[in-house]
Amino acid sequence: MEILTVANAAGTLTESYSTGELMIIRDHINLPGFSGQNPLLGPSDERFGTHFPALSSPCGKEF
């Protein structure tokens, strides 16, 4: 069995959450994508895998 633990800094606009509370992040916003900066742009090189992977679940299995 493999276990991955990741630490992150996240914020919320919901006033019912207090500083230091644990939360599960289920989605993210790609802010550079709004300005047209996308790491998937450019020539395709199959050595690096699929050029346009599905991003419907970029973080793996849904909780």
Image (cartoon, rainbow, N blue to C red):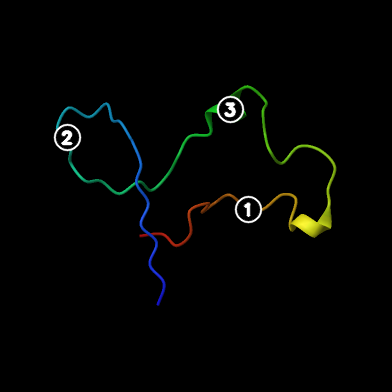
Distance of mark 1 from mark 2, alpha carbons?
A: 32 Å
Element type at mark 1:
loop
Distance of mark 2 from mark 3, alpha carbons?
A: 27 Å
Q: Which residue is mark 2?
A: 17
Pick the residue in front: 27 or 5. 5
Element type at mark 2:
loop
Q: Residue 25 appears at what percent x and percent y?
A: 35, 46
Residue at the (33%, 35%) spot, across then down: 10
Q: Which residue is mark 1?
A: 54
Quadrant where the N terminus sits is: bottom left
Element type at mark 3:
helix
Under mark 3, the amino acid is Pro
Is there a contact, CB below 8 Å, between mark 1 and mark 2?
A: no
Q: Seen in the image, is 41 located left or right of residue 6?
A: right
Under mark 2, the amino acid is Tyr
Front label number (1 vs 2): 2
Task: Give the image quarter of residue 21.
Answer: top left
Residue at the (75%, 55%) spot, across then down: 48
Under mark 1, the amino acid is Ala
Q: Residues within 10 Å of mark 3 (few under 14, many from 20)?
A: few
Q: Seen in the image, is 38 located left or right of residue 47?
A: left
Pick the residue in front: 45 or 36. 45
